[in-house]
Structure formats: C-alpha cells, structure tokens
Image (cartoon, rainbow, N blue to C red):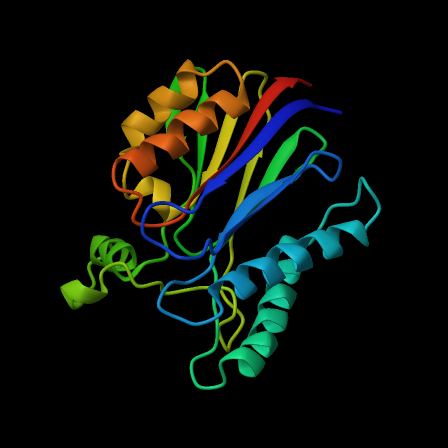
Amino acid sequence: MPLLRAAALTDIGRVRRNNEDRYLCDEALRVFGIADGVGGLPGGAEAAQQTVDEILAALHRQPPDAEPDLVAIVQQTNETVSILGHRISPAMGIGTTLTFGCVRGNTFKLAHVGDSRAYLLRKGEFMRITEDHSVENEARLRRAKGEVVYYHEANRNALTRCIGQPTPPEVDLISRPLVVGDRYLFCTDGVTRMIPDSEIGELVAQADTPEEALKAIVSLAVRRGGPDNATGVMVFVDGL
C-alpha cells in the first residue's frame, strides 16, 4: 500500500459570513478532495456537506480494495443534492463543486465537476490536472476547436457544471500512476483566484510537510484579501 501523508486546511476568509467549503481527507479510505458550495445560491454549505457525506458513505459501502465507479458515485451524489435543493430552495436549487480522488493500488483516480482544482508536483514540474468548468474556460476550449462563442463578461466565472444540477453532470475522470515524491493539491477558487499557479507551485515545492504547504497557501490567499473561503487538501506520496 502506498505511503501517504495528507492534511487539510480551511479558512473562512475576510469577507464571507459563512464557510461553504468542505473537504475530504480520509487516509484510511484513501480519499481526498474538496467541495465548494456555489456562491449566490442559498444552501451552498448544505450542498457541499451533503456531497462529502455522500462520497464517504458510498466508499464506506465498498470493499477496501474495490475499484469504485466514480462517475456513478458522483451522479448519485448529484441526485441526492438536487433533491435536497428542492427542499431548501425550490425556486433556485443548491449547488457545489466537487474535485476528489481515490488512491487504489498505485494509482490516483480523480473525478471533477466545477471550478475547484487539482494540481500535481512531480519531479520539479507543477501542473494543473483539472480544467475549470466555467463559462470563460469552456468558451476558450470551444474556440480552440473553431467554434464561434460569445459570453457576457459578467458571467465569465459562472459554472457550467455543478453538483446539484437538475440533470446528471458530465464528470471529468483523471487517472495518474503514483510516483514517489508526488505532491497532490486540491484547492478551491478562494485560493486560485488570489494566487497564480506558478506561485502555488513554489509553495508546494518548498514545504517539508503537507501541513506546512497548506498553511503557506491558505494564509497567503487570506492576506491578499480573502474575498472567499480558502480551502486546500495536500497529499504527499512518500513510498509505494
């Protein structure tokens, strides 16, 4: 079994009255990730909490070494959150992002919906391994294919997919073989909107422990204004 060190840290920031971020950091289940309740809708915290509860419950029901069907788990979670949304906010619903991964064998398998992010530092190279599901980013990807796409600047950061939407969301699946020395970071947009990727990568590389990395990253996001909740989960791969 891979030798992992993991930590999680969240901060409400300097503006929000509530922390609507939630995280997954269960070394026994080998599941790690984050959910960021959608701002502008009621029930963001409830959506994120229900999401992490559903993920953990689904994984607890499986044998420890079973290969989880992440798409099925995410879509079942979406249905549960959607039902909760009808009760909490019949007119608007509720929503959350979800970016999480399970270590099975020597592989990290991730599922991603929304604009929270996962990064990987491997052998000195820091890379983002998820794509934001936002209006601006999806327009960019479609334009790269030759499509003509327009959007209003005010909507550039709006999500195009989330957990809690009426129809099952398309789920991005990512699989990475583990390499000794890998460092995986999951974080919400309260971090990524305040700190550029290059600087996040430097903080991840410089840290001696997952806790040290997260303290540096989250505290920097808050010092730069903390307009949103800032949350991260860090996983170090120490051995295979």
Residue positioned 74% across, 56% down in the render: 57
Seen in the image, is 61 located left or right of residue 83? Answer: right
User: In terms of image quadrants, where is residue 80?
Assistant: bottom right
Q: Is residue 208 left or right of residue 80?
A: left
172 up-or-down from 89: above or below: above
Please name whichever residue, 170 or 87, is drawn nearer the observer in this view of the structure. 87
Quadrant position of the C terminus in the picture: top right
Question: Residue 214's x, y, as percent?
Answer: 46, 29
Total number of numbered discs in the rendering: 0
Tell me the quadrant of the picture where the N terminus can be found. top right
Q: Considering only vertical position in the picture, is 150 above or below 177?
A: below
Q: Position of residue 140 (x, y in %)?
A: 23, 54
On the picture, is 210 further left or further right than 62?
Answer: left
Q: Residue at x 60, y 22 (%)?
A: 237
Q: Give coordinates of residue 84: x percent, y percent.
A: 59, 75
Is residue 125 visible in the rendered structure shown here? yes
Residue farthest along the bottom direction in this orientation: 91
Q: Residue at x 62, y 64 (%)?
A: 77
User: Outermost residue toward the right?
Assistant: 63
- Who is closer to the viewer here, 206 or 77? 206
Task: Report the residue at 26% width, 41% height from top.
Answer: 225
Q: Quadrant of residue 161?
A: bottom left
Say whether residue 231 is left or right of residue 176: left
As drawn, 11 above or below 91? above
Q: Position of residue 162 (x, y in %)?
A: 46, 64
> Between residues 120 and 214, which one lies in front from this camera angle?
214
Residue 148 at least partly seen: no
